Amino acid sequence: MVRRRPATSALPVTLSSRIPREIIDIIIASAKHKTTLKRFSLVCHAWAVTSQRRLFSSTALTPRLIRHLDGDPHASQRLWPLIQHSSIRRLYEGTHVLLLKQKKDTLRVLPGMTKLNSLALLECSPQLVRLLGEIFKADNRISTLRLGQVHKFPSFTDFQECIAMFSGLQSIALHQVTWGDDNQSTLVRGEAYKTVDVPSKLKEVEIYECPGIAHMLSWLVGTRRATTRTLRVPWLRPVEVALLRQFTHLENLEINLVNHSIPGPVHGSLDGILSGWGRLKTLKIGYIQCMLDWTDRLVRGSGMAWYTEVLLSLKTPLPHLHFVLAYENVGELDNFAWRDVNTTLHSLAFPANLETLEITFYGTGKPRLSERVCEEMVRTRLDLHANTSLIVRSTGH
């Protein structure tokens, strides 16, 4: 005999209205999927308000979404103000007439997005970056900006002007952003680029796979060198490393050199590179491609891996150190300079002040090592100080 589960009645309105808003917020915050949030929004009005706030806090601004909300004025009035982060991808494509309509629609809906503070512009034109900069120039509310595959600004000065319009900017990420030719060869010597002021609130900068890294680094230290606190440059040429000497105010740094197709740094070029960095709290190095022989990353003339020379240049305590090791098969992990790193950790200016050593194993093949196996590998190869906690992560694709 099959027993049927008793039917459950809906939550009475009188009861749901007595549930404290804090409890509702905690329950809805636990939802991991949009489907769950949509179901929560059907419980009652109070649940719908909180669920929709989470559902629409981040969304892609597409012509389809604009058309959909245009067809429902009530939903449009309710949902546009909920958006805090918006991404725009390939918005301006098609015929000239379509481009004009997309531009008109975008300009029309943006004023209604009153809580918008974060923008991601992906595969868009520099003209769109300038247009949005002009729109948000007055209110300073865009604090986070991400540009991905934006080609090609007429010049670096034009790029600077567009970014400077976002005067409230606190964080910027650049991925494959290009601009017209400037005298880039003169910038790698560390000369400041002072054409346009950097946004005064800028604290966090990420530059990845951008051919004009020297321009950007020189600009950051040219006018307001005390503002940036976090810098991530995971695609740095050896000739550009010298520019890091001027970032003595940084608290968090992530660096990696390009692969072995470019010769390693020359002996002496890394001497004292971080010696004046009294505020550095976290140094992340990676990801290091262990499928390459680590000797390809030697400092020419010293016989040491470049990242060990960077560590040895520190003259003040470093609380947190993070390596990211990329591998395809287990044997490649032997290519990491374990012995050099072990020696370097004990040669730091203040080895007992290293609170955490984090190593992320990034597997690009299968099988991928478990975190337990990775931790055993690290502990057998590195002799850690008693005050240092080890964090090991295993990830990949």
Image (cartoon, rainbow, N blue to C red):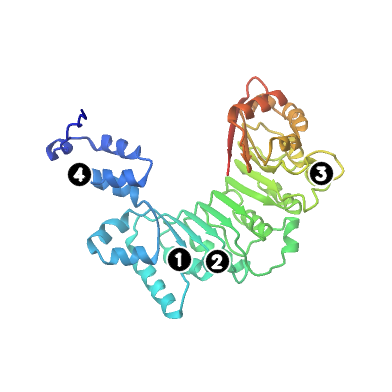
| Mark 1 vs 3, N-terminal side | 1
Residue 148 vs residue 135: left or right?
A: right
Verify CB contact (< 8 Å) between mark 1 and mark 4.
Answer: no
Q: Which mark is residue 132?
A: 1
Q: CA distance from mark 1 to mark 2?
A: 12 Å
| Mark 3 vs 2, N-terminal side | 2
Of residues 194 and 106, which is closer to you in this image? 106
Of residues 327 and 307, which is closer to you in this image? 327
Which mark's residue is nearer the viewer, 1 or 3? 3
Q: CA distance from mark 1 to mark 3?
A: 44 Å
Q: The residue tagged with tag 2: helix, strand or loop?
A: helix
| Mark 1 vs 2, N-terminal side | 1
Which mark's residue is nearer the viewer, 4 or 3? 4
* Residue at the outermost left position: 14
Q: CA distance from mark 3 to mark 2?
A: 38 Å
* Residue at the outermost front position: 1
Task: Inspect the image, locate mark 4, and give the three-letter code of the amino acid beneath it.
Answer: Cys
Compared with 237, 135 (above or below) is below
Residue 100 place in picture, x, y as percent: 41, 77
Q: Around disc 1, counting alpha carbons within 10 Å, would you say few (fewer than 14), some (14 to 19), or many (20 or more)?
A: some
Residue 1 place in picture, x, y as percent: 20, 28
Q: How many marks?
A: 4
Which mark's residue is nearer the viewer, 3 or 2? 3
Q: Around disc 4, counting alpha carbons within 10 Å, would you say few (fewer than 14), some (14 to 19), or many (20 or more)?
A: some
Q: Which residue is mark 4?
A: 44
Q: Which residue is mark 2?
A: 161
Residue 346 vs residue 76: left or right?
A: right
Residue 316 vs residue 306: left or right?
A: left
Q: The residue tagged with tag 4: helix, strand or loop?
A: loop
Task: Inspect the image, locate mark 1, and give the three-letter code of the amino acid beneath it.
Answer: Leu
**Quarter of the figure with the C terminus:** top right
Q: CA distance from mark 2 to mark 4?
A: 48 Å
